[in-house]
Amino acid sequence: MNTRAEVAKTLNVTENHLCRVLYGAKLRTLYHDFDIRKKSGKTRRISAPPIAIKSLQERLLIHMSLHYEPKPCVHGFAPGRSIVSNAIRHTRRRHVVNIDLKDFFPSIHIGRVVGLFQKHPFRYGKEAAETLAQICCRADGELPQGGVTSPIISNLVCRAMDNDLMLFARRCGLTYSRYADDLTFSTNHSELPDGLVNNVDGLLTPGDEIDAIIRSHKFEINRAKVTRRDRTERQSVTGITVNNFPNIRRSFVRKIEGALHAWAKYGYDAALTTYRDSFTKHERNANHLDKVIRGRLAYLKMVRGSNDFLYRRLVRRFNVLCSQDPIGIDEIGTLRPTRLHNTIPQIGGWKHWADMHAGSVFLLEIKTPEGDIHCGSGFHVGHGIIATAAHNVVDSRGATRQLSLICGENRISPAAVRTAIPNSDKIDVAALRVDQIAGTKIIPTQLRLPEIGEEVAAVGFPRIPQRNRTMVMHVGTVEALPTYYDGHRRFIQVSFQSGGGLSGGCLIDKAGFVVGVMIENVFMGGETTPDCSDESTDEGDSASEHQLKPLIHAAPARPYGQAVPIEYFDAILPTLWHAGASAMPIPERHESNTEGYLDVPN
């Protein structure tokens, strides 16, 4: 393109219309300026173009995108990339340095934009380049932050700077990325190069080399926003914690949980009044708490993924309160295991956790109609809620069993125990509400699926209650994560047996978190498939449909233990709310000293 007429033809408008928009109506002076509040409390000026100019910018953006290929280091305003892809490049690093460019968009004036269109990959004539620059810039010559074409233009203007910074990073053994005006460098080397940052009398300043590179490209470093964090501190890249994996601040999750709890307990209007000033002060939908929560859940999903257990737990709570427009989540059986992060070694190993959780695991005495006494286990997760196996609570006919809870010398009568089980009889978990134990210690839960080969332990009372009431810990490994052939129910198969009174006990990982509820002892029959009986069954017989076939063939016949992921227990809490206990808070979560899984209390 060389002329204004060719520009109009490319944008599929008439030349008269193009001249009228750019010169006749003075629309370039009519940008709508407004401020949005940043998390720091400061404001960011946004300049929204008039409708006519915005239409031209949208047409131009399509044309420019055909000539633009973002560099590997660029993650802002690039298709398929985001703040998450930017953060992933800097996870698990010894040092992370963040540098911010001052007045990023205003630094790109109309003269630089004209030069951009005259160079590769466009190589347009002077008249065409000036016309395109006028479409993209305000009347005062600034590139507006809020213009449709401003992001792609900023990336194109920064190409040469990105090249120089990538060469600098490669020479110094650094990883470099840029998201708009946020520059990030990271490394696993013990020391950072002097050319990157310097510490002068406790004040962190940019190094001479990095400062010279950025100045040579007509940008300036915002010296107040130069930060350096090592792995002992919270390392953040574009607002995402990167110490171990892309994560978010605990305070972000606390606000979501707090709003959901207030909504469930006091009603929507009261919760909106409470959180309008605090929870929604940076949000556009300040008068629509449900939209704010939905947006924050979408952000949580973007950072941690749709299969993240914390995200799924919060979505389930939201769906109970907003049942008319729920957020869809996948079946538990489709989830993949998650690696254990931030395990802090404890003196004494598993014995440490046995001692820590001793006051939180309960013996369940189960009295049959014939007067026999059986036993099971359960554990306290907070607010007087005990997790256990459903077959400890109801018998095969669906009748509620007579229970007593024993912890040390304390016995709780059956009349003080309230129970809740899932609507489906295929999930062997249940919740007991016992107000008398609300003040006792809890066992923190971690909503994740353990990996195969991970070391775990089961805690409970696998003994006949009249003979021995000693709590026992069985240590072993996760052998498999099988699912029933309906594809919806997932189990944790462990290397030790879980028979007797261990049913309902807790399965913990090496960090002391509960990851599952022990449910049964299953006999692995080697090459043969176990049958319900010697008689053949009809094709539609329900007993044969739900038979779990061997998952390991030609293996020695032996029993193994099974547990269900703790998320199945977490999933029945909305059932309790629907049953009329909507004010009941969710079980407490443990808040560790690291940026690991964000299982936090309300």
Image (spheres, rainbow, N blue to C red):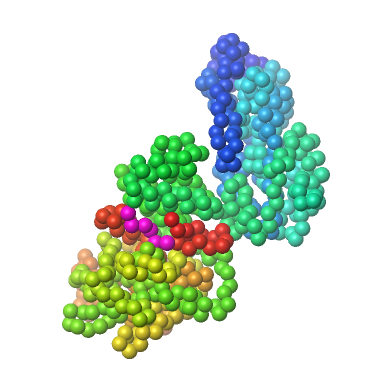
| Residue 64 found in image quarter | top right
- Report the front residue among 350 and 89: 350
Q: Which residue is rendered at x = 76% and y = 46% of the image?
A: 205
Residue ranking furthest to the bottom: 467
Check if residue 77 falls in the magenta segment.
no
> Relative to 259, is 129 above or below?
above
Determine if residue 343 is in view. yes
Quadrant, the C terminus? bottom left
Q: Position of residue 532 (x, y in %)?
A: 25, 76
- Report the front residue among 478 and 428: 428
Q: Position of residue 297 (x, y in %)?
A: 45, 47
> Relative to 297, is 409 above or below?
below
Q: Position of residue 574 (x, y in %)?
A: 32, 56
Q: Is residue 357 left or right of residue 85?
A: left
> Relative to 28, is 65 above or below?
below
- Report the front residue among 420 and 449: 420
Count every numbered label the image shows and give the total. 0
Magenta-highlighted stretch: main secondary structure?
Answer: loop
> Relative to 44, is 197 above or below?
below
| Residue 26 found in image quarter | top right
Q: Which residue is rendered at x = 65% and y = 60% of the image?
A: 232
Q: Position of residue 349 (x, y in %)?
A: 54, 78
> Magenta part of the protein: which range?
583-588
Q: Is residue 20 left or right of residue 589?
A: right
Q: Which residue is rendered at x = 44% and y = 37% of the image?
A: 286
| Residue 182 found in image quarter | top right
Determine if residue 526 is in view. no
Q: Is residue 270 left or right of residue 446?
A: left
Quadrant, the N terminus? top right
